[in-house]
Structure formats: structure tokens, C-alpha cells
Image: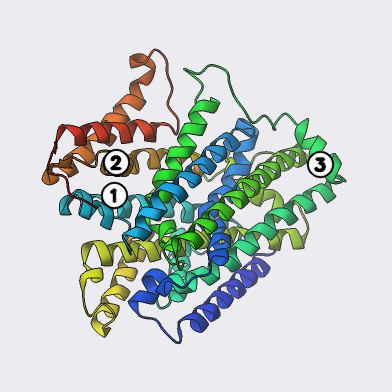
Amino acid sequence: MSPNLLLSFVIGYFLVLIIISFLTSRKSSDNSTFFIANRNSKWYLVAFGMIGTALSGVTFISVPGQVGSNQFEYFQFVLGNAIGFIVVATLLLPLYYRMNLTSIYGYIEKRLGIVSYKTAAGIFLMSRTIGSAFRLYLVVIVLQRFIFDAYGMPFWATVLTSLSLIWLYTFKGGLKTIIITDSLQTTFLVLSVILTIYFICSSLDLGFVEAFETIKHSGYSKIFFYENFMTNKFHVSKQLLGGMFVTIAMIGLDQDLMQKNLSCKNISEAQKNMFTFTGIFVIINLFFLSVGALLYVYAQKNGIAMPLDELGSPRSDFLFPEIALNHLATLPAIVFMLGLTAATFATTDSALTALTTSFCVDFLGFDKKADVNSAKSIKIRHLVHILFSILMFFTVIFFNKVNDKAVVSAIFTVASYTYGPLLGLYAFGLFLKKRGVRDKLVPFVCLLSPAISFFLNQNSKTLLNGYVFDNELILINGLITFIGLLFISNKKAKIA
């Protein structure tokens, strides 16, 4: 498909987002609007918009791509996610609303101390920057391969342009703008996956029933894996546990998605948002896995080989864009590009807003300032927003140099190490309410825990009789942090 046509749709898409930003921020663009949308968001808009943020371009491309080697095993992880969402809605959200928090790490300050608080916020800043850079990287390499290579534009310029456009429509309205743009982006994402299934089925001359039967008998549709608990990282128990605790850490203990929940009017609406979101999330992921099975069936029927990366290695992340942009008709290609762009930029714009919020509140103390909406404070927030955009730029460039596997695997691997300490901190605070900690020692525990987890992961076959870790490693990481905090604990508990 013509790069000129694809580029025109991407430009048109961003123009729509910039217009929305102008309309949502023209009456108010102060820090209260940017951070929590004045706590006036509609729960149904938040629930729908969160789909785009939670899924991202990783789900859009990498999940279908992995079906060829892993079948539907990812759905085990998704079911674990659903359990985690319920835990977040019933345990963590009521806590955050009771404490009237802007940054969720304010709980750690009141429960464990200022150093623990800064440590938790710092872990989030690092984790979210890395995770969002991974997600942005995935869509940028697709834009580069199918659009900007035709113009001789270098990879770094594509990344810089993408981040500049995101900054342009988020720097004023922040969360208030993102609640609206995420709903639009989710609409494109959902329509894209549904229409992609329709277009592929039409190309294969399959009706709905025939498509279901084709997927069922394709050899790609196995969901539950019960074999070889010790050595099989896809074992159902590992995936359910990993999915549950990754969700609790990456959603419930992450400022990004929780910031959207905290913008609802009250806890009741926030919980309605989470329960609705959970149901849609499970269904949409099943659709993406179905797309993956159909892509491989289509590739086999039409003799399409697995696309190669610049080093000549097979790259499953490229299969979906290869078929959508080079083998289907013009309309499916346009639908794919809009869906991919919407999915990934919904994640990145949200992340930049959350990173800016966390740094301004947790490290600059905006929530404690009487002049939080002064011109000076707003100017500082703009500067922080720019600096995080620059940091994400360099992180994407670095990741482009070192990544050699599917991005979805890389994201959850990193999350197991970076979010584990947050899991341990909150577990200690919530379950050992009569104990405090030696606050200044907490950073050392939070550094030591991922290091021990990494050692265990690298040597588990030898140390644990052949056992192989997957996403459940985050639970081990959190448990090590919890035990470490117990060792440095005392009876001087703070009450939160």
C-alpha cells in the first residue's frame, strides 16, 4: 500500500486529537485539570478509554504474532488479569478514595515514611518509562518500515516526531483531554480488530461459523496448558498467578491507570468502571488471539513467509502488519494502521501524563502547595512533561539497539523485576498494620529484591530441580521485598 496514503491518514488522525485537545482545555488547563480532570470524569468514558491504554500496540501486533508458537496460551494470562482487576477494584480503589489521593504513592508516605514513599514513586517512574517506551517502540518500527523508510527518514526522527505530536495534544489538558481521546482511540482499536477479522474471513471465504471452526481446528487454539509444571513456563497455574499479580502491580499500584480511576466522582463510579472494563478487556483479547490464528491460516494458504527484521531474523511482530498492509485490500490496510496508531498512542499519551503527575506530586510536592495552579507551577509542569518526553525518546532509541524478541515478552519480563518491589511495599503496608519500617533502609531492600529474583530466574533449573519461571516471578520478587521489609521492621507503625 502507498506510504503517502498511509501517512495522510496518520496525519489526519493526529489533527483530530489536537482539535479535541483544544476543545477540552480551552476553558481550563490548570494543574487540577491536568492531574485528575477535576474529579469529574464519566465512569463509562473512563472504562471504555482504559481499554486502549491497557491493550496498546503490543496486544495489537505482538499477541497475534505469538499465536504461531504459543497458541492461545496468552489467554490464561488474561484470565489471571481479570482476577487481578477484581482485586484492584475491591481492595485498592476504596483505599485510594478514602485517602483522597492524587498520587497513589501518597499511601506509602502515610503508612511507611517519606523515604519509602520516594522509593515507591521512583520505582513507578522507572517502570512506566521503560514499559511505555517498549510499547511506543513497537508501533514506531511499524511506521518506520511501512511509511517513513520510503522517505528516507531515520528511525530517531520517527520517534521524535511521534513524541512531539503526543506532547502537542496532551501538554495543556492532560488527563481531561486523555479521557476523551482515549475513548476515540479505543473506538478505532475495537473497530479495527473486528473489521480485521471480517476482512481476513472474507479473503478466506469463511462465514462466522466456518471461521470459528477453522480457528478451533487450526492447531493454534489450545488455551490451557497443564503439562510439566516444573519446566513449562506456560503452565496454567503460572500464567493465572502471573497474570493476577502483574495486574495488581502494573494496574493497581501504577499511577497511570489508577489516575484515570481517581478522576471519577466517587468510589462507586470508579468500581463500575473497573468491572465494566474487565469484561471488555477479556473479550477483546480473545478477539486478538483469534486474529492471530486467522493470520497464520491466511499466511499458510497464500504462501506468505514470516517477515524478517533488519538482521534477517524471523519476526512474528511483523506478521500482522505485513499481511494487512501488503496482502489485503486498501480499506483493511487503513483500518489496521488507524487501529495500531490508536492503540499505541493511547498508551503513550496516558503514560506521559501519569509520569508528569507523579513527579510533580511525589517529588515536587504540588499537592502540598497552596499555589498549585499558579502560573509558575503550571510552567514547571510543562517543563517536567517535556523532560519525560525526552527521556522516553532516548529509552526507545536504546531499546531499538538491544531488543531481539517479541515485545510483549520483553514488557512482562521487565515488569516482573521493576514492579515486584511495589507489590512487596503495599502488601507490607496493608497486611502488617501494626508494624513500621526503618525508613532509610527501604531503598536497599527494593534494590536487593530484583537482584535476588534475577539470580533465581537465571539459575532456577539448577536450584529448584528444573523449575522454570515466567510471569509469576513478580510474586517471588514481591515476596522477597516483603520478607526484607519484615527484617527491617519495628513496632512504630504509622496509621494510614
Can you say whether 263 is above or below 467 in the image? below
Name the colour scheme.
rainbow
Q: Which of the 4 image quadrants contains residue 163? A: bottom left
Q: Are marks 1 and 3 in contact (CB under 8 Å)?
A: no
Q: Residues within 10 Å of mark 3 (few under 14, many from 20)?
A: many
Disc 1: which residue: 123
Disc 2: which residue: 421
Q: Residues within 10 Å of mark 1 (few under 14, many from 20)?
A: many
> What's the CA distance linking mark 1 and mark 3?
44 Å
Q: Amino acid at mark 2?
A: Pro
Disc 3: which residue: 211
Residue at image position (57%, 45%) is 62
Q: Is residue 128 left or right of residue 61?
A: left
| Residue 184 coordinates in the image, percent (x, y) | 60, 68
Q: Is residue 247 left or right of residue 280?
A: left
Q: Amino acid at mark 3?
A: Ala
Q: Nearer the viewer, residue 73 or 436?
A: 436
* Callout 3 secondary element: helix
Which of the image's four quarters has the N terminus? bottom right
Does residue 151 appear in this view? no
Q: Nearer the viewer, residue 168 or 438?
A: 438
Q: Is residue 86 left or right of residue 199?
A: left
Q: Residues within 10 Å of mark 2 (few under 14, many from 20)?
A: many
Q: Which of the 4 image quadrants contains residue 301? A: top right
Residue at image position (58%, 77%) is 16
